[in-house]
Image: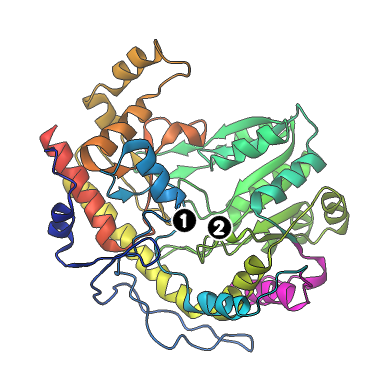
Amino acid sequence: MSPNAFTRRNFLRHTGTSVLLGTAATPALLDSRPASGQPATKPTGPTAPPPHPTPTDFDQVYDRRGTDSVRWDRAIAHYGPNIVAAMGVADMDFRAAPCVTRALAERCAHENWGYMHRPDSYAEAVAAWNHRRYGVEIDPSTLVFTTGVHPGIIAALHTFSPPGTRVLMMTPTYDGFYGDLRFARTVPDDCEMVVDADGRYSVDFDDFDRRAQRCNSFILCNPQNPTGNHWSPEVLTRLGEICLKHRVVVLADEIHCDFVSRGHSYTPFATLDPEIVDNSLTFMSGSKSFSLAAMKVAWYYSTNPDLLARIKANTRADLSTLGMVAMRAALNEGEPWLDELIPYIDANHDFAEAYIRDNLPGVRYTKAQGTYLAWLDVAEFAERIGAAETAARESAEAVNPVTPEAIVQRWFAERAGVFLNPGPRYGTGGAGHMRMNLASSRRIVELALTNMAEALAEA
């Protein structure tokens, strides 16, 4: 593409609107237009929060550049200011739910930051949320807060998987788990999933059973990041039965559970047969649902008091006042906002699937059942641009091996201004794929895909 391909004018040409200038403190916004998607589902029941007073315009572009955003500023630091669509790191580009901003402002009005007393209302908010949305009953007194799902899983690995032992995972899976395993000095045991001609993933249960015999713990990703699977009760039950048979503790990471595509449903592992559930712990947070990752609040729970007692002995959580305040507000008051967001994300998936099918030859995407992530098959495109040959040449002179997918990442970053995550980082089965984050204004999603299509046409 031409050197001016990613200028401000090019951005406006694709969005068809004007921009209000802003700074890092007051980010630039595009003019708004009505959000699309399915009508929000109104929560019911005695613990349902009041309805959100005004609809949220998720089409409005909220500029996060220059705010120390990992998603945007790290991509720009690596590839330069031509990045106009940072579609990598899994957080969202939308303004926070208004209830969160309001709660933080109210707390900041009290200008003292001494030690925080945490009343029962924080655990009760988590329990009410789980009961209201998923039908899961949690005794608030047994709930354990952590500074993220990662510290919780690491505490579990320290408890159940001694250094040097294997940890079972179904792959491709969330790349952060590999960092957790390295920290706990354990070894990944990748059970590669089976992918059919339509790009759908399923579990190889025979391979899972063989691997379970040599593992102490299994990290379940439900729904599966990056493939987007929402596991059915039947699949979860079979996994749970195999783990129970081989005395493998299930560590269920269900952080993406609120994002469900139309026609699919989320099954909490904690709703299975009690004997299976007793062999598990569930790790959750509102950090994905409300984009509060930097607030560093998560929790885990189990119906098994012995497992809880053992892992609590290895858990140390230094929670911040603002993190707890933000999370409680989101769980108590943010449900209407989230119920508006979910169909918007679902429509982003529909848009991406159709656009890629019609305009990106050599790239395939099968709509995810859940999460706000798209798992792109780029194997044909990588072959077309000779990514494997380029990677081999560069690997010969590099300290670390260069993968074909790293070449694809650079190709789209430099020629389209679009940053994607390379598939091999998600473990066995990730080759030939890229991960794309769709949790942005549809204008940004459209800009990213349009630039990719134009770059492909000029290749």
User: What residue did someone put label 2 on?
Assistant: 293
Tell me which corner region of the image, top left, top right, bottom left or bottom right, holds residue 321: bottom right
User: What residue did someone put label 1 on?
Assistant: 91
Please, is residue 227 above or below residue 322 in the view?
above
384 vs 437, nearest the viewer: 437
CB-based contact (under 8 Å), mark 1 and mark 2: yes
On whether residue 394 falls in the magenta region, the answer is no
Q: What is the three-letter code of the residue carrying label 1?
A: Asp
Please, is residue 14 above or below residue 392 in the view?
below
Q: Position of residue 153 (x, y in %)?
A: 70, 47
> Is the N terminus in the top left, top right, bottom left or bottom right quadrant?
top left
Q: Magenta residues?
A: 116-144
82 vs 13, nearest the viewer: 82
On whether residue 138 falls in the magenta region, the answer is yes
Q: Residues within 10 Å of mark 2 (few under 14, many from 20)?
A: some
Q: What is the three-letter code of the residue carrying label 2?
A: Ala
Q: Secondary structure at mark 1?
A: loop
Q: Secondary structure at mark 2?
A: helix
- The reply to whether residue 111 is visible in this rendering is yes
Q: Is 283 on the left or on the right of 70, as rendered? A: right
Q: Residue at x 62, y 47 (%)?
A: 220
Q: Residues within 10 Å of mark 1 (few under 14, many from 20)?
A: many
Q: Is 215 on the left or on the right of 149, as rendered? A: right
The number of callouts visible is 2
As drawn, the residue found furthest toward the front would be 111
Q: Position of residue 58 (x, y in %)?
A: 34, 70
Q: Position of residue 459 (x, y in %)?
A: 14, 31
Q: What is the C-alpha distance between the residues marked 1 and 2? A: 7 Å
Tell me which corner region of the image, top left, top right, bottom left or bottom right, holds residue 18: bottom left
